[in-house]
Every structure is written in C-alpha cells, then in structure tokens.
Image (cartoon, grey):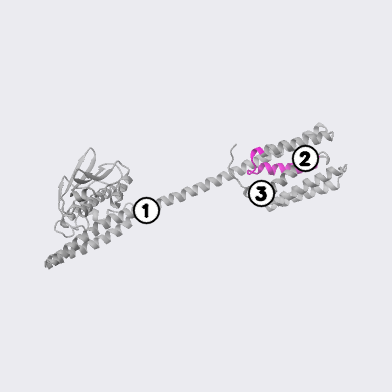
Amino acid sequence: MIEPMHTEETESRPGRARVTLNLAAVLIVTVWLLYPRGVRPDLLGLIVGLVALAAWAGWAIVRAGRPRTALLVIAALAGAAAVGGTDALLISAVIAAVISFVATPGHRMWSVVALVAVVAAVLGVESLMDHRDAPFLLSVFGGLVLAVLVGVTRRQGRLAESRERELLARALDAERESARAALLADRTAAARDIHDVLAHSLGGLVIQLDAAEALLEAGQIDSATQRVVQARRLAVDGLADARRAVSALRDEGASLPRAASGVGALADGGTPDPDASADDALGVLVATHRSLGFTAVVDGELGVGGLSTARRVALGRAVQEALSNARRHAPESLVRIRSTRADGFLSVSIATALPASSLHSAPTATEHGHGLIGMRERFTKLGDGSTVSAGPICDDFVVEASVPLSGVS
C-alpha cells in the first residue's frame, strides 16, 4: 500500500484538550493502580504498570517525532505486559497507545501491523502465565480490536483531510500557472502588436525623412516640406496606433488598429483618408506603400468585408508586415499582390522580387524576425484553419495568408 507523505508534526500534534484528557486518564489509572480496591498487584506488575503510565503521559505531552513514537510503543508493550498483573487495569494504556499509533498516517502500515501483532502476543502470553480464563482473554483482545478499529477510522479521516489539502494546493498551483501563462500571453500579444505598429509607422517615418533630406540637398524646399509634413502625420498616427494596440489588449473586441483599418493611413495622393473603412483595410495599406514612393500591383479585390475582427487584424498585419519588409529589404523592387476567394477562403499572396544580395539574407518564418514570428502567432491563435507562410520562392520573397470566409473566429 502506497501512502502519501505526512509528517507526525502535522498529523499527531496534540491539542490542549487532548493533552488534558490523556493526563487526567493517566492520573486516574495511576491512583487506581497504587490504591487498588481488590488484590494489590505484585512488585513487578506495579513497576511495569508505572512504566506504561509514564510513557502514556510522555507521549501525551510530546508534540511529534521519534520520541513520541518510541513512547507510544513503550506504553503499548508495557501496558500489555502488565495487564495480567493489574487485573486488566493497564489495558487502558494499551488501547490509548494503539489508537494513537494506528491513527498516525506517518506510521507505515507494516509498522502498525507489527506493533498490533506484538501487543497481541504479549497479551496472550501474559494472560496464560497468570492462568486467566476465557472471558478475561476475550475482554482484553476485544479491547485491542476496538483500539485498532478506532485507530484505522481516525487514520482514514486524516488521510482524507490530507488529500483534500493536497488537492487544494494543486488547484492553487494550477491557478498560479494559469495566471502566469495568461501574463506571458499578454506580454507576447503586447510585443506582437507594438512591433506591428512601430515597424509600419516608424519604417514609413524613416523613409519620409530620408526623402526629405535628399530633397533638401537637391534644393527642392517645397517637396521636402511636404515630406516632413507627411512624416509628422505618420508619427502622430503611429503614436495613436500604439495606444490603440495597448487598449486592444484589455478589450478583445477592440477595433482594428488604425494602420490596419485604414483610418489615418495615406491614400495615393499622400493625404489622410478619413473615409477609409475597415473593409478597405488592405487597399489602404497598399495605397500607403505607394504614397511612400514604392511600387505595387494588385490582382483581385482586396476588400475584407464580412470577415471577423480577429481575421481582419491577422490578414491586415500579414500584408502590413510583408510591405514593411519589402520596403526594408528590397526598396527598388516591385511588389505583386494577389487576392483570391475560393473554396470558402480568402487568400492573399504578397511577392517581392529580391535582388541577389537580399535573397539569401531575407528572414524566414522560422527565423527570429519578430514581425514574422508575431504573424504566425496571430494566425495560430485564430484556431479556425487560417494559415500563413513566409519565405523565398525562386527569386521572390513570398508571404501567403489565408482565412475562412465564414464561421466564428
């Protein structure tokens, strides 16, 4: 039988009331032993009986540990040895000691069985040596059996309480782990969203400022001024997007961040388009890419109408990351975007022609590019069959994303 680990300190620590009751019982039995109403016990029986009573008082006082176990064994064995000589008076010490020993979960079952067997043997030998009759034997062995039954009952009760405590501790541990996992998930989501926002807005900001610097060197003051104005708008939009991304972590139903929804993004002419809606989010991202001086061609409709918020966000972030990487790794290359609706899925492919120097150094979805990692995490979190992949194909770097057109996400 395998039992849970217990300490005697937690399972056998005597309460004040229990100590008082045991000491009162010891005092009564001691008085009865020293001043008997019947036949006075012989000297040996008196000494052994006093030893049993002293051990009984000792284990009632001692809190826990091996000394208490030793006192229990002494009280049980000495009491059993003095049963015959004290006219069964010391069976009370035997019963009390056996109950306490058996009821302590820290005592292994083999030690319980061994103690009960030895006590039974001592009782039998002592009774036979004193020529006791059958009723006497039945009474003392009945007391021993009663003690074992009471001890087993208490033991099971303590084991049940211990299991409840263990289950409670495990539940608390599981709750702490769940809270920790939720915290890590929130941190991951924060890192993913902030990266998406800043990589898009700051990347565009750097491009505008570089263009403004080049225009200033060429003496084109008006054009440079326009680029600085656009850079300021990107900075303002980026700050607003960052705030929205943080707010979205507290509200899963929050709307798409501005850079992905189109609000505040730049249209073809380089000015904000206040009428842009979430359904035209991908189109606005392409318009923004073109307004920054880059080229892109589109095949198919880029509307995301009918998609859930989570799917719009995931798809928008995938396109946003692909365009940001194209500006970063292949600013002179043409970006080809293809959108198709088939078999219940909306699929978008963004292919960027990479120069030979960039083709082999371009990040892949399995490498440590934070944007690509965040993109995969976002699609995995949907859990609805949505897929995304990124990597070099022939001479292009291709991002492919696909989301269901129906169902709940």
User: Disc number at residue 65?
Assistant: 3
Residue 45 location in percent, x, y?
83, 42
> Residue at point 27% right, 56% down?
197
Work out how far the residue at label 1 is from the one at label 3, CA to CA, in angstroms. 48 Å
Location of residue 273 by image quarter: bottom left
Measure the alpha-carbon separation of dots 2 and 3: 23 Å
Residue drawn at x 66%, y 43% as measured from the top left: 103
In what element is the residue under mark 3? loop
Q: Secondary structure at mark 2?
A: helix
The C terminus - image quarter = top left
* Mark found first going from the N terminus, 1 or 3: 3
Q: Are marks 1 and 3 in contact (CB under 8 Å)?
A: no
In the displayed structure, 118 sits above or below 162; it is: above
Q: Name the residue furthest top.
A: 134
What's the residue type where badge 1 is placed?
A: Asp
In the rendered structure, the answer to whether residue 148 lies left or right of residue 222 reads right
Quadrant of image for the N terminus? top right
Three-letter amino acid code at disc 3?
Answer: Gly
Instruction: Tell me the tag on residue 186.
Output: 1
The answer to whether marks 2 and 3 mark residues whose Cβ atoms lie closer than 8 Å is no
Q: Nearer the viewer, residue 206 or 235?
A: 206
Q: Earlier in the sequence, mark 2 or mark 3?
A: 3
Residue 94: image location, x then y, percent: 75, 42
Is residue 90 on the magenta stretch? yes
Nearer the camera: disc 2 or disc 3:
3
Residues shaded magenta: 88-110
Residue 370: give x, y in percent of width and height: 30, 52
Residue type pointed to by label 2: Ala
How crowded pointer 2 is (Cα within 10 Å; few <14, some 14-19, many 20+) is rated as many
Q: Residue sitting at 30 percent across and 56 percent down? A: 194
Q: Which residue is mark 2?
A: 80
Residue 363, image x, y percentages: 26, 49
